[in-house]
Amino acid sequence: MTTDQYEVLSNQAIVIAAGFYFAAFLVHLAEWAKGRSAAAEVVATAADSTASAVAAEEDSTTITVAPPVRAAEDPRRARLARIGVVLTIVGAGAQVVAVLARGLAAERVPWGNMYEFTMTATMMVVLGYLLLYKKFELDWLSPVVTGFSVVVLMADVLLLYDPVVELRDALQSPWLVIHVISAITATGAFTLGGMASALYLVKHRHLRKRAEAGMPATGDGYLDRLPGLPQLDRFAYRTTAFGFPVWTFAALITGPIWAEAAWGRYWGWDPKEVWAFITWVVYAAYLHARATAGWKGRAAAIVALIGLATLWFNFVGINFFFGSGSQHSYA
């Protein structure tokens, strides 16, 4: 195949991947809708049996929560969950093909611009979700991951697409592979953790409003069937704790080494360099506060989301707000 044919294959494969993700998203929505009646039965049973309730106390508000209904407890949900995961796996396979074909078309690693980085970072989010799916029972995260992937890939194709071009001189370095793959891996981990943190805040507010209104904390909606607040908090912490040393390696070690090789200086106050360091500081504060001050729950989730916001602003916002003022404007 020629390089032009590989580029066409990459473009087609990324559309196919988005299509499978969208189908998986719809299946997972149907999965959670199917579970409403089953969840209602569990809630009714839990209301008559205090032994099945779990007390969670935060911000001086005590909330009684029935255990969430897992997909494995309902055959209909379990079947839809399996179909959704299979569709996601097929979509991830198509996205891997898209990334590889893009690299073959460019005859280099496919991380030379925002379009290619976004395509690969989204792939890392999906692959991370699939790798952790069984261990952490991530059926509750399925509609979020698939919906996120569809939206980001649509924006990537419609707004960020660039045809295959040769790398700029500054990117002609083996440090490209080391620096970017570590940054992409950390981005995937931080994004998964941020999803859990966002769900934590939404569920916490949902339970608090029910408690303040004197309503039972149980129900049959999506939020009621999420894992408990401690489980959401723990998953967010573990993914962030994994991503932080990888980000440290990418932003504070390989990045400066590559900058010195390309531009003759380790640090130049470039906007992307500054915001990469800001992201590192926020996540360092998050982990430090948890380890020393015992921060958990709502406060930790807010800090984690601030870190995720700085991460994605560094990637997207710098290019739009600073433009040619950054030496990293190509990425």
Image (tube, rainbow, N blue to C red):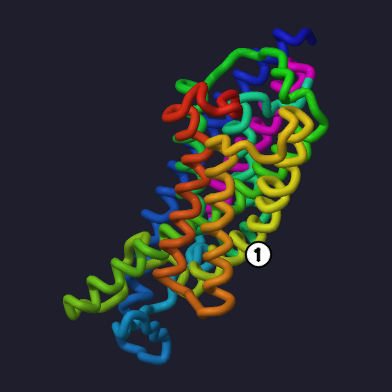
**Is residue 329 visible in this depiction of the protein?**
yes
Span shown in magenta: 79-107
Tag 1 secondary structure: helix
Q: What amino acid is labelled 1 in the image?
A: Lys
The majority secondary structure of the magenta stretch comes to helix
Give the residue at mark 1: 135
Residue appearing at x 37%, y 84% in the figure: 57
User: Which residue is situated farthest in the right direction here?
Assistant: 174
Q: x%, y% of residue 207?
A: 30, 72
From the viewer's perspective, is 290 left or right of 320?
right
Q: Is residue 90 magenta?
A: yes
Which quadrant would the C terminus be assigned to in this image?
Answer: top right
Q: x%, y% of residue 277?
A: 58, 49
From the viewer's perspective, is 214 left or right of 182?
left
Which quadrant would the N terminus be assigned to in this image?
Answer: top right
**Is residue 77 visible in this depiction of the protein?**
no
Number of numbered discs: 1
